[in-house]
Image (cartoon, grey):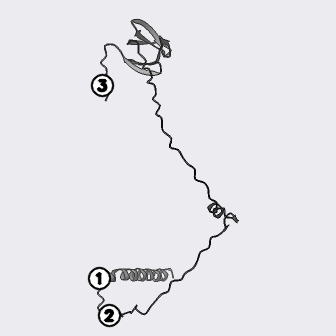
């Protein structure tokens, strides 16, 4: 019973695939010589006259979405006086150049690292030698970061890096 059912289903599947393959491949491989081209019938369009349908659109005073009378018609009927605009001359305000802060003479001579991870930077400011921790300030200079070969300091909202004396300053590319 099961074997006959499988055979019947296999024949049905092969038949379906065979017909689909034949319909696909007949356009490419099989010539249809039985078709005869017939001349197209002549159609005379001279006797056909079409008349245009004319109609008039009237303005709609009722807004179907808001369920109220349209205010567009009322606004169009009202004449609004035109406003006269005077051209405004633009006055370019010249900003006063901000004074560039004059940095004191700063030299970095190295650092000492203590046991509590506090770096102590050795800075020479205007000829005076100071030992400053990170965050300390002297003569308006605030130490922000301390590294082995450089230090970052702020002076009047401007930040600069100073390299240790004796080091070659790396080129910036």
Numbered disc 1: secondary structure? helix
Which of the two residues, 67 or 2, is positioned nearer the viewer here?
A: 67
Q: Residue under label 1, please give it.
A: 29
Up/down of 170 relative to 66, above or below = above
Which of the two residues, 72 or 44, is positioned nearer the viewer here?
A: 72
- Residue 19, percent from left and from top: 40, 83
Measure how far apart labels 2 and 1 are at the Cα level. 27 Å
Which of the two residues, 163 or 85, is positioned nearer the viewer here?
A: 85
- Residue 42, percent from left and from top: 36, 93
Q: Nearer the viewer, mark 1 or mark 3?
A: 3
Q: Is residue 149 visible?
A: no
Q: Residue under label 2, please give it.
A: 39
- Which quarter of the figure is the C terminus placed in? top left
Q: Quadrant of residue 31?
A: bottom left
Q: Quadrant of residue 166?
A: top left
Q: Is residue 65 left or right of residue 117?
A: right
| Contact? badges 3 and 2 (CB < 8 Å) | no
Marker disc for residue 171: 3
Measure how far apart labels 3 and 2 are at the Cα level. 87 Å
Up/down of 43 relative to 89, above or below = below
Mark toward the start of the polypeptide (2 vs 1):
1
Q: Nearer the viewer, mark 3 or mark 2?
A: 2
Which of the two residues, 132 or 11, is positioned nearer the viewer here?
A: 132
Q: Is residue 47 visible?
A: yes
- Residue 99, percent from left and from top: 44, 20
Mark toward the start of the polypeptide (1 vs 3):
1
| Contact? badges 1 and 3 (CB < 8 Å) | no
């Amino acid at each position: 019973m099961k074997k006959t059912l499988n055979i019947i289903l296999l024949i049905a599947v092969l038949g379906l695939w065979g017909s689909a393959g034949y319909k696909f491949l007949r356009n490419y491989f099989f010539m249809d010589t039985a078709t005869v081209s017939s001349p197209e019938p002549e159609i005379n369009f001279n006797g056909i006259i079409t008349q245009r349908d004319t109609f008039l659109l009237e303005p709609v005073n009722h807004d179907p979405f808001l369920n109220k009378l349209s205010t567009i018609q009322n606004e169009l009927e009202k004449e609004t006086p035109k406003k006269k605009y005077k051209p405004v001359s633009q006055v370019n305000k010249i900003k006063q150049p901000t004074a560039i802060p004059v940095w004191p003479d700063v030299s970095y001579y190295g650092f000492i690292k203590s046991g509590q991870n506090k770096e102590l930077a050795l800075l020479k400011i205007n000829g005076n030698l100071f030992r400053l921790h990170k965050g300390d300030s002297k003569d308006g200079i605030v130490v922000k970061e301390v590294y082995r070969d450089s230090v970052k300091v702020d002076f009047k909202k401007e930040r600069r890096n100073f390299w240790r004396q004796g080091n070659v300053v790396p080129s910036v590319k």
